[in-house]
Amino acid sequence: MWKSLKDSKTGLIGVIIVLVVFITAVTATLIVPYDPAKQDLVNKLMNPVFAGGTTKHLLGTDQLGRDILSRIIYGSRVTILVAFSGTICAGILGITLGALAGYYGKWVDSVIMRIVDIQLSFPFVLLALFVAAVLGRSLRNIILIAAISNWVQYARLIRGEILSVREMEYIEAIRSVGGKNGRIILYHIIPNVISPVIVQATLGMARIILMEASLSYLGLGVPLEIPTWGRMLSDGRDYMLTNPWLAILPGIAITVTVLGVNLMGDWLRDYLDPKLNV
Amino acid sequence: MKKKLMALLLVFTMTAGTLAGCATPGSSEKPAASETGAKQGEEGKSAGQEDRITLTYAQTKDVDSLDPRNATSTITAAMMAQIFSALVTTDEDYNIVCDAAESYELIDDCTYKFTLKKGIKFHDGVEMTSEDVKYTMDTIRAEGADYKLKSDFSFMYCEPIDDYTMYIKTDEPNASTLLRLNYIKIIPKHYVEQVGDSEFNAKPIGSGPYRMVEWNKDASIKLEAFSDYFGTKPSADELICKVIPEASARIAALEAGEVDLISAVTTSQISRLNSLGNIEVVSKPTTRTVYYTMNSFGDSPVTDLKVRQAINMAIDKDTLVQGVLDGYGQPCNSLALPMFEGYDESVRGYEYDPEAAKALLAEAGYPDGFEVEMEGSFSGLSNAADIAQAVGAQLAEVEIKTVIVEKDSNTIKDEYEAKTTSPLTFYSFGGPYNNINLIMKCVLGTGERYSAWSDPEYDKLVHDIDTAVDPAVSQEAYTAIQQYLVDHAPVVPLYQTHAIYAYNKYKISQWIPRADEMLILNNAKIDK
Amino acid sequence: MAKYLGKRLLQSLIAILGITIIVFLVLNIAGDPVALMLPETASFEEIAAMREKMGYNDPIFVQYFRFLGNALHGDFGMSYNYGVPALQIVLERVPATVTLALAAMGISLLIGIPAGIISAVKRNTVLDTVIRSLALLGQCVPAFWLGIMMMLLFSVKLKLLPTSGFDSWSALFMPAFTLGVFTAATITRMLRSNMIEIMSKEYIDVAKAKGLKNFAVVMKHAFKNALSSVLTVVGLQIAGLLGGSVITETVFSWPGIGRLLVQSINNSDFMVVEVIVILMAVTFVVVNFIVDVLYCVINPRIRLQ
């Protein structure tokens, strides 16, 4: 694995970006220069240090005088939290439904695949908006949205894999010696699909990060007091003409993170499953 | 097969192009002007296209409706003021003046006698009579009617005497009758009866300075000066109202010359705009007050008077206005604004005093403070989310930890109805018929639509100011209700908002904005 | 083929039915439409009478079938905010969104197809690296941010394009580009990898050996074969474009159904939300059905799968 990573420059960059964001998120409370909620109205709307600001606030301050660097660091927590929990929930949901559909076939399969069709026919943002509008704005709901808009890919992967191995001889053999269905799925089928699932999860994570940012931008994301990149960007819109950095910086944070996740996903795909070409 | 495919692709791309062409409203044909007044159309042409003065302005939202009986948003109301006229109106400083009325007099506590100006024409040339006034008020008041104006306006009705004189009566004495009448835009009975409500909404006819030409939903409204208008001719021949929701996009459009005037300028942009040279920024204190209501129905700490007083003292309004709004606002310590009739400046509200606030909290049994939910809808008001967060930070100084929850305004309205709002709810109240009577009633009256407060003693005070028609008698009642706000501290008044506009100063001059946020430029000088 | 298409048609119909069920149920959970329909002063008796009159006291499945019946007649109820039929409000905004989505699709095909071909043919050159990096970036940039940045650059700094508006070709460019970037990037990447795969196949070598010019080979064989994958992307991306229009229209004040959706959500105008959600989802189902039909025509082997 190390060798493959060293050989792939882009993969290495991706992994480094993801690690940096992850570590930043985990250690946020330790490394922030200021409390991200600390307001300082006298020193509001300061430019970053490279655009004429002071070293006191390296990336400047926002419209309430809060330190932007601290807020970007804190913002990574929501990004990481939503991306990981959303992916895990989507994975569990998708794998369960996919396994049921593939293994039991018949009407179970039909019902689940029709749900998949319906799910796929809701544009992603539309579904998110709809759920956010009905359930209200909270971190939990964002994760829920991430899960229900991302489970389909996993379900399809698992189902396809099960369909192809179900009738294979060794599965028949296990069944004939009294193997339970659940055990068969868990120990003999899941391991076969773990590689494409990991690849799918990485790419799904990138999508979730963009979704969270979009929802926060539309004002349907996480609550006001939690700093998120999408919300910072959205707040920055009104200051575009005088303080463009307010919108530029969180945008860069989102883009770089998504880029890192995508690069890592591409590399993982090449490494784990060279045949796979999504 | 491959040819088919290439052709398909080509067709697809080309369809994209053609459709784009068809759907652009700029190229769409103008609705026939003859329908709404052929005479106007001809005159417009004879004036010559090159001499016409067109004024384009940008607002944050589109109008909800073009039927004045459904006009509740400020932006809709402003458009109504261009197309329609009412018996009375207000001047820039919120004093009541005659509009379609020639004169009026108070006959008894429940009756005004109005005389209409003679020769007022609707946009189709038909003359306005007292029957139109009656029709307008009757339809709003009618049993089963669901016009949005119903709740605030159904207490009055019209009894015509002849074509030009009429009584305006109220069910009980009401001190707000005249001010409310400025919001009842008179609709033409003959036309509405003939075409029906929905057609009227699409192609409204009024008697105001401008007639409607074209309405592209969510994009623009085009108006044309009405040459038979009974009042002063407006200075622009054509008025185009564009919808540009993003603040930065509005400013960019102004700078690029796409529009001549913009509303809702963000305060942080003002110094930059002023430095450009060709742009003038003006601001005007409005009738809108921003405040927190405190829910008296739950069992939260704010049901305790001492806590409510402490919260009032813990908030530094001057810092909010200077720090967040850059001074574009007026800190206030009552729901009653100085411009309102009956305002008594001798009634002092709470001053900023965090130490006293802490002491009161300790007395109330919260020496270490408490945590409280604070909700609001922040999309409609500039810097609202910033203000809420700044208030949160100030309350934290006296150990009151706040959790700010953003909701949409309809959810909050529903909560007010059910009296389930958060202990602290951020809201604002204003508009073209706001006065002490209205804001005091709606925000604190028992069962009212923006109220989370209930006290029979207070309701009596509201009734007193409502029914005291004689100004000499009413001052005492007005003072009493303002004093109640100090004694019981049911709300935290924050500030009076400023409306901020920016315009091209080579195009517009001598313009005075209005206190009621109606964007009306009839008093301005407009150049080509 | 007819059997396959029949099956797909049936699946599409089931999906559409499912969508209506979900939308109906979710909106029923969302709130009491009666309270919104009546003026604020309505008494509890009036509300109860209205509930009875509108049939909100009937069992839920009765309500659903009534809703479905009305919907088939184009009756989705009145918009709370505008006081006119919700469908009418939405249909007025449809041309703007269709314009934007088609323009975005046009731009993404115009960018994506040449970029994908060049990238595949000039594999492992500097040009290829540049195209691949841009394509990757195009998939990572949040569309709304890109829109804002373009506005900052082209409208505010350079004053080349109008910031918003709906009345000129120049006003269409930025929103369409913003919306099309992700699709363009997806098409580029997809086309590149498919073409490389196909070009490595033997029959291309045979064609080359027959002496065909290199370009002819590329166009005739590789591109033709790779195109079916582009078609699939186009079908799938319709959803992305419709969804993306929600954000792009908000950024650029484009008067389409996407912005109307966000506004209606903020106004709790659920009748309008309902129409838009159903309309968008049904459009997507229909487009994908058409894509499948086309795919089937182009590539008859699909029937065997």
Image: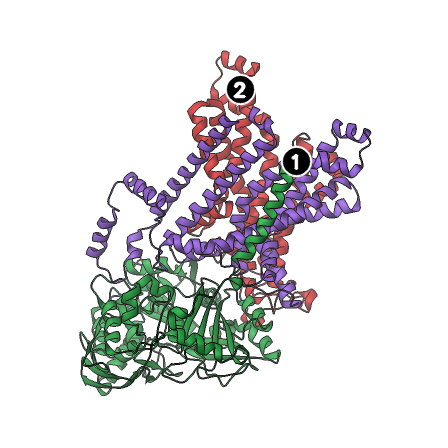
Give the label on residue A166, or none.
2
Could one spot residue B517 in this view of the protein?
Answer: no
Q: Quadrant of the N terminus of chain B?
A: top right
Task: Kindly report the distance in space between the C-alpha atoms of the residues bearing marks 1 and 2.
Answer: 39 Å
- Indicate the quadrant where residue B101 lies: bottom left
Inspect the image, locate mark 2, and give the three-letter code of the amino acid beneath it.
Arg
Inspect the image, locate mark 1, and give the three-letter code of the amino acid beneath it.
Lys
Residue holding disc 1: B2
Chain identifier for the green-coloured part of the image: B
- Residue B349, percent across and down? 35, 78
Q: A8 left or right of A205?
A: right
Q: Could you tell me which residue is drawn at 50 percent across and 48 percent down?
A: A125
Chain identifier for the red-coloured part of the image: A
- Indicate the quadrant where residue A111 lies: top left
Q: Quadrant of the C terminus of chain B?
A: bottom right
Give the label on residue B248, or none.
none
Chain identifier for the purple-coloured part of the image: C
- Residue B510, percent across and down? 49, 86
Above or below A65: residue A160: above
- Residue B308, percent across and down? 34, 68
Above or below B455: residue B7: above
Q: Could you tell me which residue is drawn at 67 percent across and 42 percent down?
A: C189
Q: C199 left or right of A151?
A: right
